[in-house]
Image (cartoon, helix red, strand yellow):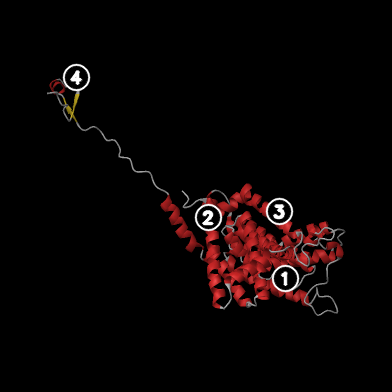
Amino acid sequence: MDRMPRWADVLLVPVISLVLAALISGLVILAIGENPWTALKVMVVGSVGSTYAWGYTLYYATNFIFTGLAVAVAFHARIFNIGGEGQAAIGGLGVALVALYIPWPHWSLALIGAIVAAALFGAAWAAIPAWLQAKRGSHIVITTIMFNFIAAALLNYLLVGPLKPKGTMETATAMFPDPTHVPSFRDMFSTGETILFRGTPANVTFFVAALTCVAVWILVFRTRLGYEIRAFGFSEGAARYAGIGSTKIIMVAMLASGGLAGMMAINTTLGYSERLIMGAVEGAGFIGIAVALMGRSHPLGVFLAAILFGILYQGGGELGLVMGIPREMILVIQALVIMFTGALDNMVRTPVEMLFALGRRAPPPQTPMGPAGPTIPSPEAVAHPGALPATHPATPPTTAA
C-alpha cells in the first residue's frame, strides 16, 4: 500500500515545499531591510502581470521544459544526467550549422531541420558518457559534468575561430538568414493596432516544448520501451532477469535525454538570438534538475514546474530592477526553492506520510471463534468400542429444577 495518495505526492508535497521556501525567502528579504509583501507583489506583477511579463516568463519556461524533460527521462532509468548544459550547448551548434549552411525556403522547414539537428547533436554528446557508463562502468555524473566543460571549450574555440564572421569582435556566428526566423509571440498574437508581447523573446518554440511533453508521456508511459526504461529504473536486477539489457536501456535513455536537452537550443539560438552566441544556455541545464525533481519526473509535472521556475526567474529579475535587491539575494531566493523542492524533499515528505498513516484507522481486530471445547466420550462408546462414537460436550447441559 502506498504511504500516501498519489495526489498528495504530486501536489501537496510540492506546495508545502514552496510555502516553506517562500517563508524563508521572506525572512531573507526582511533581513536586508526590504518589505517581503512588496517584494512578492513586484515578483508577481513582473512575471505574470502583463503580456510583456508573460513573454519573458514563457521564454524561460520553454528552456526549463526541455532540460527538465531531459533529466526526467534519465531519472526513470535511475540515471542522473547532469550534463544538460553541455548537451544544450552542442545542440545550439547543430542548430547554427543547419541554419547557416542549408538554404531553407520557409521558417517551418527550418524549424523542423533545427529540431532534428539539435536533437541529434545533443544525443551524440550524451552518447559518449552513456557508452562509458554502460561498457566501462564510469560514473555518469562525473563524465557528464566533465563534458559540460569540454562543450564550453569547444564552442569557445569555434566562435573565436572557424564560425566567427570576418571583421567582427563578437564571439558569435553571423545572423541566420531571414527565412529561418521563426514567429515570435508578438507576430502570432498581435492584431491590428493591438500589440501584444512587445519586445519579448517568447516564440513558437513554446508550443514545440508543449508537444514534446506529450511525446515524452507517450514514450515513457504508453510504449514497451518506456516500460523497460521504468522497469530498469525500479530494479536493475529484476529487469535483467526479465531479459531487459542494461546496455540498451542506458544508451537509449541517455540518447533521449541528450536529445531533449539539445532541443533547448531551438528556443535560445533559432528563436531568440537568431545566431549562436557564447553562454546561451544560461544555467538552464542545472535548473532542469530542480524542475524534474519538483515535477516528479512526469511530463505534466515538468511542464507546470517549468512555468513556476520561469516565474521565479523573471520575477527575480524584476526584484533587482524595481527594488534594487542585489542579484546575489535573488539567487539565494531561487536556491531556497530548489533546496526545499529537491534536497530537502524528504523533510516535507516524511511528516506528510506520517499524517496520512495516522489518518488510516485499521478496523478493530475480530476475536476468532474457537472450538466449543474438548469432548468426552460417552459410556456407550467406552463399553462398545466398535459403535459409532457419540460425544458429550465438556460442559454438561443444565437441567431444569
The first of marks 3 and 4 along the sequence is: 3
Q: Pointer 2: residues within 10 angstroms few (<14), some, or many (20+)?
A: some
Q: Is residue 332 visible?
A: yes
- Circles 3 and 4, Cβ within 8 Å, touching? The answer is no
Q: Name the mark nearer the viewer: 3 or 4.
A: 3
Residue pointed to by mark 2:
9
- Which residue is at the front of the view, 71 or 369? 369
Measured in 3D between alpha carbons, the distance from the residue under mark 3 to the one under mark 2, in whole angstroms, is 25 Å
Label 3: which secondary element: helix
Position of residue 172 relative to residue 117, above or below, is below
Residue pointed to by mark 1:
280
Measured in 3D between alpha carbons, the distance from the residue under mark 3 to the one under mark 1, in whole angstroms, is 23 Å
Residue pointed to by mark 4:
387
Residue pointed to by mark 3:
211
Indicate the amino acid at tag 2: Asp
Q: Name the mark nearer the viewer: 4 or 1.
A: 1
Label 4: which secondary element: loop
Q: Pointer 1: residues within 10 angstroms few (<14), some, or many (20+)?
A: many
Seen at 79% across and 62% down, the residue is: 186
Seen at 35% across and 43% down, the residue is: 364
**Side of 191 relative to 240 (left or right):** right
The first of marks 1 and 2 along the sequence is: 2
- Which residue is at the front of the view, 193 or 380? 193
